[in-house]
Image (cartoon, grey):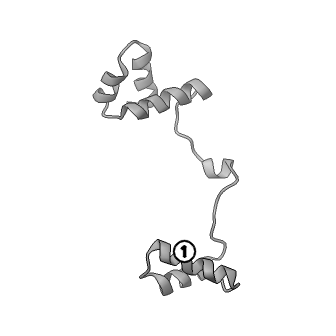
Amino acid sequence: MTRSARIAAVRRGERKKDVSQMFNISRNTLDLWLKREEKTGDCRAVTNYQHQQGGGQKIADWERFRNFAREHGGKTQGEMAFVMGRQRNSAEF
């Protein structure tokens, strides 16, 4: 069943609590879909959101990143971020 059908059930008068339980979705999810439909006229999932916001790839040099990951793969993300920050400041990365 689609999002539209679940929203239609609410529009027909079904209680949000009952619709969310019937279709095994959270009440919050149903509310978010309803808000999106009300705001944009559509309840479909947002796609390509990174490109719409000017985002995209953060890693410019994949080979360099792979080497860094191999060298520091035993570290936590926080430790890797610290080392990477140090390397950026010293113009090594």
Whole-percent x and y of residue 11?
Answer: 44, 15
* Residue 55: quadrant of the picture: bottom right
The residue that disc 1 covers is 81
Disc 1 marks which amino acid?
Answer: Ala
Who's the residue at 63% across and 52% down the image?
50
Q: Farthest residue toward the top?
A: 13
Disc 1: CA contacts within 10 A as few (<14), some (14-19) or many (>=20) = few
Work out which quarter of the rendered image holds the N terminus and state it: top left
Residue 41 shows in this picture: no
Depicted 69 relative to depicted 10: above or below: below
The quarter in which the C terminus is drawn is bottom right
Q: Secondary structure at mark 1?
A: helix
Q: Position of residue 44 (x, y in %)?
A: 52, 34
Q: Is residue 44 left or right of residue 64?
A: left
| Residue at x-position 42% and y-position 30% | 30
Q: Residue 29: x percent and y percent?
A: 42, 34
Q: In which quarter of the view is residue 59 placed?
A: bottom right
Q: How many marks?
A: 1
Relative depth, front residue between 11 and 1: 11
Residue closest to the eye, 81 or 5: 81
Q: Position of residue 66 (x, y in %)?
A: 54, 80
Please identify the quarter of the rendering in which residue 67 is found.
bottom right
Q: Is residue 58 visible from the viewing direction of this image?
A: yes
Decide: is 57 above or below 50. below
The residue depicted at 55 percent of the width and 30 percent of the height is: 36
Q: Residue at x 37, y 22 (%)?
A: 16
